[in-house]
Amino acid sequence: MTTPPDAGQPAPLFGAADIRRLAAEVDIRPTKTLGQNFVIDGNTIRRIVAAANLGTDETVLEVGPGLGSLTLGLLDAAERVVAVEIDPVLAAKLPGTIAQWRPERAAALDVLLEDALRVTELPHQPTSLVANLPYNVAVPVVLNLLERFPSLRHGLVMVQDEVADRLAAPPGSKTYGVPSVKAAWYSSMAKAGVIGMNVFWPAPKIASGLVRFTRREPPATTATREQVFAVIDAAFAQRRKTLRAALAGWAGSPVLAEQALRAAGVDPTARGEVLDVAAFARIAEARAEAADRPGVI
């Protein structure tokens, strides 16, 4: 273990040798199935924690803590960390690692053996989400946690760089799509940097991106989130088609789709990629209101 620093020096974080030793202790090899890529560079951890803009009174939700690289940095910055880990070996290892490296902060860590896509309860209400997310489930994890835990006010996630671009994309851009619009329902998202491949073990084949978000209220609408998301899914399932055509199945016919679009103030010949989340909410509301009127299918 790294020797504790002198007073005034940064607390020690894991290096490559530390990560490999910790993995060897529990006979862990990173798996593609779980999207495991462990950060082996302390400066990268400091950069992520600084970019997260954490307050000292915050409870941070971390997903996929792995061997604890980021967990150490988060415990140095925030009041408490709730770590959700799907791998039982890693979940069992983490408390002991933290007790060794940050004995004075061990009581500030809760580790849950859970799937972040299914977790419904946490021991403390999180105010921030900071995580190095597995590439294959990054978007559904972010959306699920924002839906499940309204106490999350802000956060920073590290995801595949291409996914970061999609989450933060504005209407009209080439990368704008379902992740962009659904994320915008909950929050404002912005790209906060790019992380190279060599700070991970094993090194991924592509760069990672940082996405910062701040929660905001959904658009004012009488439509439910499920109704709005159904419109979004339909619009981008056939993104090259006009909205009149793409939403025909969702609305019941091209005529009904056009009626909903015009009632929402949206050009029926437009495509979904040019609409913001508020426009999708208006479309969902218009169709729901029409369906509730007598004589309207």
Image (cartoon, rainbow, N blue to C red):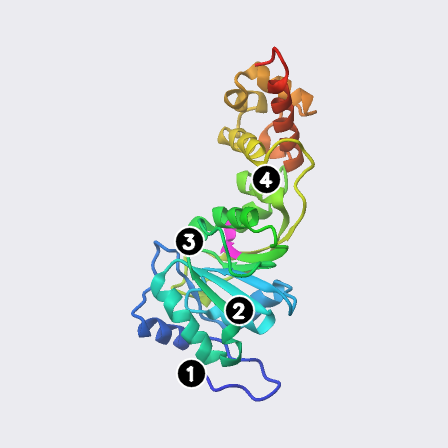
Residue name at image x 64 percent, y 32 percent: 281
Q: Which tag is nearer the camera, tag 2 or tag 1? A: 1
Count the labels in the image: 4
User: Which label lies toward us, 4 or 3?
Assistant: 3
What is the spatial separation of the Cα atoms under label 2 and label 4, in whole angstroms? 29 Å
279, above or below 125, in the image: above
N-term mark: 2 or 1: 1
Q: Which residue is mark 3?
A: 115
Tell me the residue that label 1 is attached to. 1
| Range of magenta residues | 158-163
Image quarter where the C terminus lies is: top right
Give the residue drawn at x 32%, y 65%.
Answer: 29
- Which residue does the numbered mark 2 point to in the structure image? 45
Q: Nearer the viewer, residue 107 or 238?
A: 107
Q: Residue 100: x, y in percent?
A: 44, 80
Q: Is residue 225 visible?
A: yes
The mark lying in front, picked from 3 and 2, is 3
Whether residues under marks 3 and 2 lie with C-beta atoms below 8 angstroms apart, the answer is no
Mark 4: which secondary structure? helix
Question: Which quadrant of the figure has residue 77?
Answer: bottom right
Q: Mark 4: which amino acid?
A: Val
**Hey, what amino acid is under mark 3?**
Asp
Answer whether residue 193 is visible to the viewer in this image: no
Q: Is residue 172 magenta?
A: no
Using the image, determine if residue 281 lies above or below residue 1. Answer: above
